[in-house]
Amino acid sequence: MAPEPFLGDTPRSPVTHHILSVLVENKAGVLSRVAGLFTRRGFNIYSLAVAPADDSQRFSRLTIVINAESAPLEQIVAQLDKLINVVEIKDLSPVEAIERELLLATVAVAEDDRAELLDRVAKAGAAIVDFSSTEATVSMSGTPAAIDSFEASLTERYPSPQIQRTGRIALPRLHPRA
Amino acid sequence: MQITGAQALIKSLEAMGTEVIFGYPGGAILPVYDPIIDSTIRHVLVRHEQGAGHMAEGYAKVTGRPGVAMVTSGPGATNIVTPIGNAYMDSTPLVVITGQVASAAIGTDAFQECDITGITMGITKHNWLIQDVTDIPRVVAEAFYIATTGRPGPVLIDVPKDLTQAMVEWVEPPSFDQLDLPGYRPKTMVDPDAVAEAAALLASARQPVLYVGGGVLNASASDALADLVEMTNAPVVTTLMARGAFPDSHRQHLGMPGMHGNYTAVTAMQKADLLVSLGARFDDRVTGRLDGFAQNAKIIHLDIDPAEQGKVRRPDVSLVGDAKSGIEALVAASQDLVQVDRSEWWTQLDAWRAQFPLVYDDAEAGAKLKPQAIIEALDALTPEDTIVVSGVGQHQMWAAQHWRYEKPYTWVNSGGAGTMGFAVPAAIGAKAAHPSTMVWAIDGDGCFQMTAQELVTARLEQIPIKVAILNNSYLGMVRQWQEMFYDERYSEVFLSPDVPDFVKWAEAMGCVGIRVDAPEEIIPAIEKANSINDRPVVIDFRTDEAEKVFPMVAAGASNDEIMVHPSQQKGI
């Protein structure tokens, strides 16, 4: 199987994905090491989010959504763990994790059509964060599924919206489901 | 004490116990070459940076200590990429130092700049671009620690020129247990419960095979392996990377498995009910077509690299740890177990051994030499501890098959990467490590032409290796495939019987050159070579280009479809 491009689409439900929460040493090239490993081993990444993990600036946390069908999960984890700068890997199964994602979208909407956009935004729990006479920018954070459906509701109504998603971040549920 | 970064680098290498650096100077590494004059470390000046890398590999393979190579930036660094990749595939500890352009010039496409840490990211265990001169001793300690512990491998340190010129207060490199590497915790001790399970599985297996790989050599586990073999009465195969890990003369040794393994070793694995993989990794050259490989075998997989577990074949019992502690634990756990009767298995194995020994046709009168006969003569005429180093191709397979290895670390070759040109420089590295041991490179005429210039290094550095070129004027292995699978359409494999003149070439490099055309000249030529100790010797053996390596499992075929020597084929 040919390796997929480094960043593909966010998976739509039903989920076959896994979330790896990876603590790395915040050293030069660490992102490149992780990305290069996925490429050369033929593993697929759906999304990747990176941010500092602590105040000391020593560590960062990568939240990597992977296609668990591109390779056995344990093989991906074992190869990742061999990278010297990878300190800890938590495998979060989607059912045991709280997942969130942020979307920004700019749609073409005339001033007198804003009512309908406001309605869609309100229903989804999103917000309008910027507008001009011909466009509006909306923001939404939520579960990936909620983001999926809001994105669908925008794309079906407004032609060629500019959409930017962050990829998901996740933490374990405090009360795991049975 | 204030010293330069260059001095700190050399002092750090000294502190790590470095005896020899194989290297080549140039602009960006220039500051580091100054303190080498005053260092206790021997520097071997190579003729091409690839040679430096392979020499360091040869040194590492016969000592177990990391080989150290040093080159300049840009083309110096890219020239050593092949040995780094080779060492990565064969789990060889290597510390490569590259000069880099000055920090301020990085990213500007400066003269002789290249992103060598980026280039080697996928073929090093880890690499560093030094960003602060005070980091040098610590990074050198980390480099040696990472290269030599866990699954060994190559590491690279890229040092910008301004940092080697900067002044710094000298601080000794930290000891390994002081290093702060939160993401690196190699697991060496196997899980006792898994060991007990493995020992029980082995004791009850009627048709087991101990499948021994290079990890046994890396972990110095040959003695432990011998104990396990004696205790279990199980047959042993040694892969291309493990030749010498167990004596070929031992009754329970079936020889080498794989694409050019012998019939009994290959077929024993195919028919086994249990494969005990000890420091091996189910390489495609061993397994053949995977879904046809050892289909009825359960798997015990001992490997220090957790990522090898289930990478190719899912184990029934997974043992993560180094081969020595793992095998010793297996021996201890087997102590009180009764091994099942394996006489039927041995009857079968002995029958295969009798029916399908490694054979070749003797040369007819006046015909060209048979390469296998040359290897057997070399083996017979050299001391038992002779180190054999090969290149890649037919000569490598014959050297692996027909030489009888009795001791560990007497066989060095390029296994995973298959790097042509490996033999001459790797032999020089081995001989530099063990000056009083005889070192023979067994090479092909194609391979020899890739790195032969290092014989100049060998002569001038007083490293008198011996080279046997099995010269059939062809790229023999490719020719064999074209004969067998491309309808004898020989495309770009014919070299030349006349050019170069290997004897003259050897002489021009300060070596003794000998040409051998006739069978009766083989022994006198080898004896003459063995008697010369003040300079390298090259023997140009003129061999039969039609000779093929058998047995053979075609690429993509199942190991059940092994092709034995034509004289044995009606026996199947």
Image: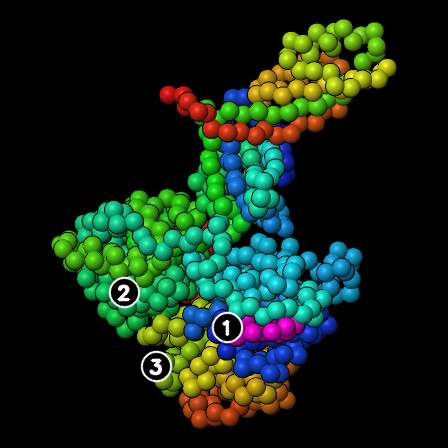
Identify the subunit bearing mark 3. Answer: B
Measure how far apart labels 3 and 1 are at the Cα level. Answer: 34 Å
Bin the neighbour count of mark 2 within 10 Å (Cα to Cα): few under 14, some 14-19, many 20 and up: some
Numbered disc in front, either 3 or 1: 1
Circle 3 residue: B384
Q: Is residue B489 in sight in this rendering?
A: no
Residue drawn at point x = 45 percent, y = 70 percent: B65
Q: Compared with residue B194, is residue B451 higher up or lower down, i.e. above or below?
A: below
Q: Tell me if residue B3 is in the magenta stretch.
A: yes
Give percent across and percent down for residue B436.
42, 86
Task: Report the disc number at residue B15.
Answer: 1
As helix, strand or loop, the secondary structure at mark 3 comes to loop
Measure how far apart labels 2 and 3 are at the Cα level. Answer: 21 Å
Give percent across and percent down for residue A45.
58, 36
What amino acid is labelled 1 in the image?
Ala
As helix, strand or loop, the secondary structure at mark 1 comes to helix
Measure how far apart labels 2 and 1 are at the Cα level. Answer: 31 Å
Q: Compared with residue B143, is residue A93 higher up or lower down, i.e. above or below?
A: above
The quarter holding residue B472 reads: bottom right
Segment tinted magenta in the rendering: B1-15
Q: Is residue B324 in sight in this rendering?
A: yes
Sequence-first disc among 2 and 1:
1
The answer to whether residue B223 is left or right of residue B19 is left
Give percent across and percent down for residue A84.
51, 52
Residue drawn at point x = 56 percent, y = 74 percent: B11
Bin the neighbour count of mark 1 within 10 Å (Cα to Cα): few under 14, some 14-19, many 20 and up: some
Q: Quadrant of the N terminus of chain B?
A: bottom right
Numbered disc in front, either 2 or 1: 1
Task: Report the disc number at residue B224.
Answer: 2
State whether discs 2 and 3 lie on one chain.
Answer: yes
